[in-house]
């Protein structure tokens, strides 16, 4: 047969068999997770029920009554306020603190690298355990921090057991655990920034404050947004620190969303109300995470484009 | 039976059709160069044959066996990728041996074969190195060795010389033909360099706009390109193209260039009245100081001496620029200014302006 | 900048010292406490000087705590063992499930692929209790409450999305032609996956596995709700410990030290992977 550039007309489009391999590979992971998705749907259903474990005979479908009840429930609004306050404080402080540390450690030197590794340790501590550590250190009888505060002339500082300082105390623990997370992200961001703008600014003798606000900060912004949103989503769902430290107390001082719904479920066995609270929390995080994912994808594109 | 045969193979990525009903065959032991501009689908063609991509339509036959739906590992082809695609976590030895381990050869046999091909390709001394420790040339040779080591019936080389420096490319162009002959494989060699295609190929398949524009021996492609597109791709400097419309005259077909009326061979009589493109290879244009029978007036604008030839830039009376090349002689340099050009009437190419096809001369 | 002045260097050093003290002092102090007797802990003012004792650790390891009201049996070592078992098994299973799925998402543009990927990612953002509270009722019905199987299954919620998103990024960075070359050389898809794709993505797999292990170890709320005493990991066990009456503070400190040592040791040992996993996991995906 000789070589031919003949257009033949006999070839009919062949039906391609679908490639099943990717489904085969990802299905096990998905199935495991779907098993966990079912309770999620159940939770939505529960939130529309009058459902108390201790009063099973009262169980019944009441549409949105659980949600409507919240509108006039002062304790609910207290929960919203405390959750948002906690979130704003932790994310705000951690962002500023984390950025400061990242800037201090920006230059890769041996000392800076050792410090940045050491600062990982709080982040690797289980938050629940960290809460216990701080609980021991703030114990009124022997806590070393109680002693320090006394040395400073503040007597009767009761940390987490005083409604006035409880929020401060748990925020402090959150800051201790999670600031390193922001620091690591921002440090990675700082070190990956292109150098030309800084060199140009240095050549032109631009003042350092100006460089920071006009060059560093804008270029770092995507990293800050990512880090902040990561923390935002975790913070508004806070449980691991507040529950071991105070169980939401003293009184109802620290009843944030998840702690409150936990108590609603186990203490008052009010499944319907607990579920409704969590659905509201989920709606808030869902809205936030949508913003987050968009931002994160944009950042990812950028990171790929630069690479 | 052809060693390799593509039957009406099509492939599209998203909306753009990269290959449109491509048919091509290669005989056993033949080296076919697949040549075309970038984006013409050469690499895709190779990847379809290797089984790394799936054809949308058509079928692929290797030694009479339909392999269209066969997995790459079962096709028995060897392939060298353009970017080498060496396994970064394996030594050069293991990279080359990877084509043998799949075939369950004994370790001694593997070692023997790898060392033999490594000697041939002069990488014997770097076999224990990791790919990142190899120079670009060594990487390229390792990739070639990997493709060759198992004596594949079909060898697919995707522009293997593209990512190496000029000196190495020159050396490899000299070495490769012998190497490929001794392997006995049927070779499909993709290149973007027409000189490489002419030097290496028994035949050249020109890929243009997703289709095979021509398959022919290198000399034939140059002398008798099937289309305007093919003619443009071969030759450096590129062919001169002049729109003409042959007219009838008692002495045979005539064309007009720059006001002069010039004769075409009588064998082009069937082109009379058609709108055509006249193709003039630079070396078939002669520039003279004195007018002659079939010459036309030009202005010699520039003369650029190269190593073995001189390029002359001419401007015709109607402002068209033409390139001529002539062998270097020891004469005095060309003087700029008015001159007379003449073409070898038997070396002209004529293309149909409507569809770009070449109009072959017809013996009366 | 080279032109930093002397004063600035001093200020910078002082700031960094304060930061290091703030973040490391709690760990340091708890470590000291774990070697002290109750009397030494209760001293005012607190002191850095004391005679170290291993009695707190001995009590934890033997499970016999001497208290004012007699001997108390406590299963802290069991908690520690539970943490090891739960975290290791969860990460092993999550790697077995997640690495192939990550590969599928990276290599194939298949229908539903992105949907599946996002579903898995969204687990990261749902409030854990939302799933856990109804799940606890289901687990009771299914007999999964207080079983290792049930816990390990739920721990996939932590480990799987993490592994999926970090490892996917690493697979995407491997040139497909490297895998193609191995297949053309005559190797099946499966061998190519095991010999080429997995080894080349190994740093990512290590980083993701390490992070997943630490997150599983540090998890609190899952086991709090779904496990009772004999299946609880250290995070929950240590809490029960604090509220139990008559326990000595040094023993709590020792329990804390034992609880955090594995993750902190891992973090220091593999900090390069960890930083890469944390920052790439967030930024690059």
Image (spheres, helix red, strand yellow):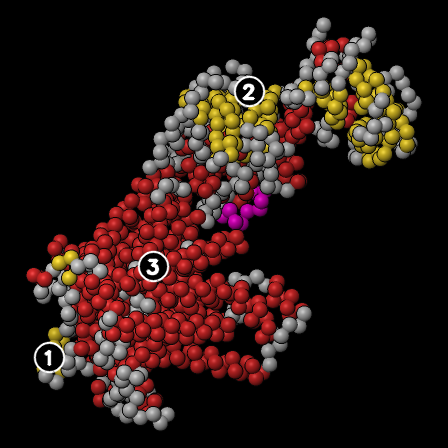
Relative side of B8 to A81, left or right: right
Please tell me whether residue A118 is drawn above or below residue B133 in the rendered image: below
* Element on which disc 2 rests: loop
Chain for mark 3?
Answer: A
Q: Is residue A114 magenta?
A: no
Most extreme residue toward the top is B364
Q: Which residue is nearer to you in this view: C158 or C26? A: C158
* Element on which disc 1 rests: strand
* Element on which disc 3 rests: helix
User: Residue visible at 36% across and 60% down?
Assistant: A287
* Gap between marks 2 and 3 measured at Cα: 58 Å
Main SS, magenta residues: helix
Please tell me whether residue C282 is drawn above or below residue B213 in the rendered image: below
Chain for mark 1?
Answer: C
Q: Which residue is nearer to you in this view: B207 or C193? A: B207
Range of magenta residues = B129-138
User: Residue visible at 33% across and 68% down?
Assistant: A236
Whether labels 1 and 2 belong to a single chain: the reply is no
Residue B34 numbered mark, or none: none
């Amino acid at each position: 047969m000789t070589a031919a550039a003949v257009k033949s007309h006999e070839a009919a489009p062949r039906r391609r068999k679908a490639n099943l391999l990717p489904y085969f590979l990802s299905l096990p992971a998905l199935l495991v997770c779907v098993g966990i998705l079912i309770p999620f749907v159940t939770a939505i259903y529960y939130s529309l029920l009058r459902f108390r474990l201790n009063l099973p005979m009262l169980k019944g479908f009441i549409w949105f009554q659980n949600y409507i009840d919240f509108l006039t429930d002062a304790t609910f609004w207290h929960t919203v306020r405390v959750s948002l306050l906690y979130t704003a404080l932790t994310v705000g402080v951690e962002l500023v603190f984390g950025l400061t540390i990242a800037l201090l450690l920006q230059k890769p030197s041996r000392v800076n690298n050792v410090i940045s590794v050491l600062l990982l340790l709080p982040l690797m501590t289980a938050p629940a355990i960290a809460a216990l550590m701080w609980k021991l250190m703030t114990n009124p009888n022997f806590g070393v921090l109680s002693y320090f505060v006394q040395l400073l002339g503040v007597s009767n500082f009761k940390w987490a057991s005083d409604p006035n300082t409880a929020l401060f105390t748990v925020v402090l623990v959150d800051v201790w655990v999670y600031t390193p997370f922001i620091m690591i992200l921002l440090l990675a961001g700082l070190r990956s920034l292109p150098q030309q703008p800084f060199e140009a600014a240095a050549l032109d003798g631009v003042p350092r404050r100006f460089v920071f606000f006009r060059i560093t900060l804008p270029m770092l912004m995507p990293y800050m947004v990512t880090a902040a949103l990561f923390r935002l989503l975790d913070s508004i769902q806070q449980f691991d620190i507040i529950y071991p430290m105070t169980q939401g107390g003293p009184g109802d001082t620290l009843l944030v969303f998840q702690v409150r719904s936990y108590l609603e479920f186990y203490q008052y066995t009010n499944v319907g109300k607990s579920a409704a609270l969590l659905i509201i929390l989920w709606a808030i995080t869902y809205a936030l995470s949508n913003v987050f994912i968009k931002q994160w994808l944009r950042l990812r594109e950028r990171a790929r484009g630069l690479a | 039976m052809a060693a390799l045969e593509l039957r009406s193979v099509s492939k599209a990525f998203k909306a753009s059709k990269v290959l449109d009903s491509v048919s091509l065959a290669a005989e056993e032991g033949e080296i076919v160069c697949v040549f075309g501009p970038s984006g013409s689908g050469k690499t895709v063609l190779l990847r379809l044959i290797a089984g790394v991509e799936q054809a949308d339509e058509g079928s692929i036959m290797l030694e009479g066996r339909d392999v269209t739906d066969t997995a790459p590992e079962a096709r028995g082809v060897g392939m060298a990728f353009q970017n080498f695609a060496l396994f970064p976590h394996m030594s050069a030895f293991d990279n080359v041996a990877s084509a043998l381990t799949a075939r369950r050869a004994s370790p001694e046999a593997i070692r023997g074969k790898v060392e033999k091909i490594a000697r041939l390709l002069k990488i014997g001394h770097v076999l224990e190195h990791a790919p990142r420790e190899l120079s670009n040339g060594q990487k390229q040779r390792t990739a070639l060795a990997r493709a060759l080591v198992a004596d594949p019936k079909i060898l697919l080389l995707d522009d293997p010389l593209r990512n190496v420096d000029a000196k190495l490319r020159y050396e490899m162009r000299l070495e490769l033909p012998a190497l490929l002959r001794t392997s006995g494989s049927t070779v499909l060699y993709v290149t973007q360099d027409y000189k490489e295609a002419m030097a290496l190929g028994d035949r050249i398949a020109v890929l243009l706009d997703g289709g095979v524009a021509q398959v022919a021996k290198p000399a034939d492609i140059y002398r008798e390109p099937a289309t305007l597109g093919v003619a443009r791709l071969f030759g450096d400097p590129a062919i001169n193209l002049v729109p003409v419309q042959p007219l009838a005259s008692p002495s045979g077909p005539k064309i007009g260039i720059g006001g002069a009326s010039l004769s075409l061979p009588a064998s082009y009589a069937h082109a009379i009245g058609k709108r055509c493109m006249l193709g003039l290879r630079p070396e078939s244009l002669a520039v003279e100081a004195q007018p002659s029978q079939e010459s036309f007036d030009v202005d010699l604008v520039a003369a650029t001496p190269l190593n073995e030839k001189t390029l002359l830039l001419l401007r015709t009376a109607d402002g068209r620029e033409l390139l001529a090349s002539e062998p270097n002689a020891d004469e005095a340099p060309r003087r700029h200014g008015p001159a007379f050009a003449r073409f070898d009437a038997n070396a002209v190419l004529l293309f149909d302006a409507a569809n770009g096809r070449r109009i072959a001369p017809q013996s009366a | 900048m080279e032109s930093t002045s002397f004063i600035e260097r001093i200020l910078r050093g002082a700031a960094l010292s304060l930061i290091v003290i703030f973040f490391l002092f709690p760990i340091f102090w708890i470590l000291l406490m774990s070697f002290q007797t109750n009397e030494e802990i209760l001293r005012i003012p607190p002191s850095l000087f004391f005679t170290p004792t291993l009695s707190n650790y001995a009590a934890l390891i033997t499970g016999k705590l001497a208290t004012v009201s007699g001997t108390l049996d406590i299963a802290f070592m069991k908690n520690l063992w539970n943490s090891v078992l739960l975290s290791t098994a969860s990460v092993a299973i999550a790697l077995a499930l997640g690495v192939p799925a990550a590969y599928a998402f990276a290599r194939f543009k298949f229908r539903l692929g992105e949907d599946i990927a996002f579903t898995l990612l969204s687990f990261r953002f749902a409030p854990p209790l939302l799933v856990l509270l109804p799940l606890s009722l289901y687990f009771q019905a299914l007999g999964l409450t207080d079983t290792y199987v049930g816990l390990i299954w739920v721990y996939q919620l932590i480990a799987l999305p993490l592994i999926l998103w970090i490892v996917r990024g690493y697979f995407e960075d491997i040139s497909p032609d490297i895998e193609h070359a191995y297949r053309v050389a005559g190797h099946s898809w499966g061998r190519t996956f095991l010999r080429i794709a997995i080894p080349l993505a190994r740093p990512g797999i290590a980083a993701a596995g390490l992070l997943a292990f630490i997150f599983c170890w540090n998890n609190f709320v899952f086991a709090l709700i779904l496990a009772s005493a004999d299946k609880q990991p250290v995070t929950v066990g240590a809490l029960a410990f604090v509220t139990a009456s008559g326990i000595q503070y040094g023993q709590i400190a020792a329990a804390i030290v034992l609880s955090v040592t594995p993750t902190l040791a891992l973090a220091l040992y593999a900090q390069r992977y960890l930083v890469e996993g944390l920052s790439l996991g967030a930024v690059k995906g």
